[in-house]
Image (cartoon, grey):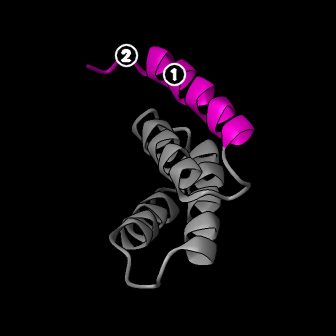
Amino acid sequence: MKDYSTALTYYQKGLKIREKKLPKNHPDSAVVYHNMAKLYLATRKYNMAMKNVQQAVEIAQEKLPSSHPHLLEYKETFEKIRKKM
């Protein structure tokens, strides 16, 4: 729908809730960081996109197996952002 500012607001609210209720570096938080990275990528805010995708990758590398589809997707997004910078 391309309502990026509203989406960002809800992602940030969701992340705050997860940070309060879940252990640090929970894989659910990585999902939110990844979604925010994709949002920033779509809006050409590459530095913010990179910051968020790095968070997602770090959490996933710590908490998920190396072949997990989420980790692989986060790494693909990382590469897309890196190429845009």
Image-based side of 43 in relation to 2, left or right: right
Q: Earlier in the sequence, mark 2 or mark 1?
A: 2
- The amino acid marked with disc number 1 is Tyr
**Which image quadrant: the C terminus?**
bottom right
Q: Residues within 10 Å of mark 2 (few under 14, many from 20)?
A: few
Q: Secondary structure at mark 1?
A: helix
Q: Position of residue 71 (x, y in %)?
A: 44, 71
Report how far apart the C-alphas of labels 2 and 1 lie in the structure. Answer: 11 Å
Q: Secondary structure at mark 2?
A: loop
Image point (60%, 54%), residue name: 50
**Magenta stretch encompasses residue 84:** no
Write the start and end of the magenta stretch as one range: 1-21
- Of badges 2 and 1, nearer the viewer stands 1
Residue 77, image x, y percentages: 41, 61
Is 76 positioned to the left or the right of 20 in the image?
left
Q: Position of residue 47 (x, y in %)?
A: 64, 48
Q: Is most of the magenta stretch helix, strand or loop?
A: helix
For disc 2, the marked residue is: 3
Q: Is residue 18 part of the magenta span, yes or no?
A: yes
Whether residues under marks 2 and 1 lie with C-beta atoms below 8 angstroms apart, the answer is no
Judge by depth and name the residue closer to the eye, 72 or 27.
Answer: 27
* Dot 1 crowding, Cα within 10 Å, few <14, some 14–19, many 20+: some
Image x and y of residue 33, in percent: 56, 47
Q: Is residue 18 above or below residue 28?
A: above
- The amino acid pointed to by label 2 is Asp
Q: Mark on residue 10?
A: 1
Front-most of residues 22 and 48 = 22
Residue 17, quarter of the rendered image: top right
Residue at image position (56%, 19%) is 9
Query: In the picture shown, does residue 22 fall above or below 20?
Result: below
Residue 35, placed above or below residue 7: below
The residue sitting at 47% across, 14% down in the picture is 6
